[in-house]
Image (cartoon, helix red, strand yellow):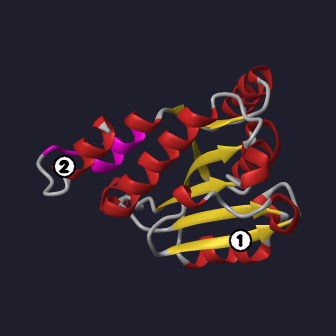
Amino acid sequence: MKDQAISSDKPSSKVNALLIIDVQEKIIRPIFNKNSIITNIRKLIDAYQILEENIFISEQNPLKLGVTIPELLPIAGFRKIEKMEFSLANIQEFLKELKNKKITNLIVCGIETHICIQQTVLDCLQKGLEVILISDAMGSRNRVDHEIALQRMTQSGAILTTTESIIFELCKTADRKEFKEIRNIIMS
């Protein structure tokens, strides 16, 4: 009897959200490898808008640090959250929206890896969310801060991947009608 009950359970479906953390005018200037990071975040946004929904953009103290750089704003359908906290997981409106949309997985990119990204990721892992770090779409002013933060977050349970890898993972098959468009984003 017990086996029948287990086999009749439906697998839970994962709901993803792309989380773009603090890619703002004043914060991005001194970031190591910033041009590559900007290019990869743009690819993520373009592909994500074709394949998925649920894009969140955070801005740390936008009055002092500026707004998200214009080339990294999605066309439409995103949620912007202004914050003073380093961790987005301390923002009730963010947590409420994750719960309401039944989001279980966060695909994370942005800056700075060792501050707002790390604190958000560690807190979200504590809350039971799955976190996927897009290592080539995030950074810090110093390379060592970025590398150590990636190690700390993966040791805490986050999954490490790259821009191209996650885009193909979201796409799932070359059979999709959107695949040609996705391939063009990757190759750009």
Count residues near mark 2 (Cα–Cα under 10 Å), then give few for <14, some for 14-19, many for 20+: some
CA separation in Å, label 1 and label 2? 31 Å
Horizontal side of residue 159 vs 83, given as left or right:
left
Q: Please, what is the dominant secondary structure of the magenta stretch?
A: helix
Does the magenta-highlighted stretch encompass residue 167?
yes
**Which residue type does callout 2 highlight?**
Phe
Q: Which residues are magenta?
A: 166-174
Is 120 left or right of 55, judged from the image as shown? Answer: right
Rendering coords of residue 178 (x, y %):
19, 56
Instruction: Name the residue carrying label 2.
Output: 179
- Image height of 27 relative to 63, above or below: above
Q: Quadrant of residue 83?
A: bottom right
Is residue 135 visible to the viewer in this orientation of the structure? no
Identify the image quadrant of the N terminus: bottom left
Percent x, y of residue 67: 72, 64
Q: Is residue 78 visible?
A: yes
Q: How many marks?
A: 2
Count neighbours of disc 1 (C-alpha within 10 A) and say few if under 14, some if 14 to 19, many if 20 or more. some
Which residue bears the numbered disc 1?
A: 81
Label 1: which secondary element: strand
Q: Residue 148 placed where, x, y %? A: 77, 23
Q: Quadrant of residue 127?
A: bottom right
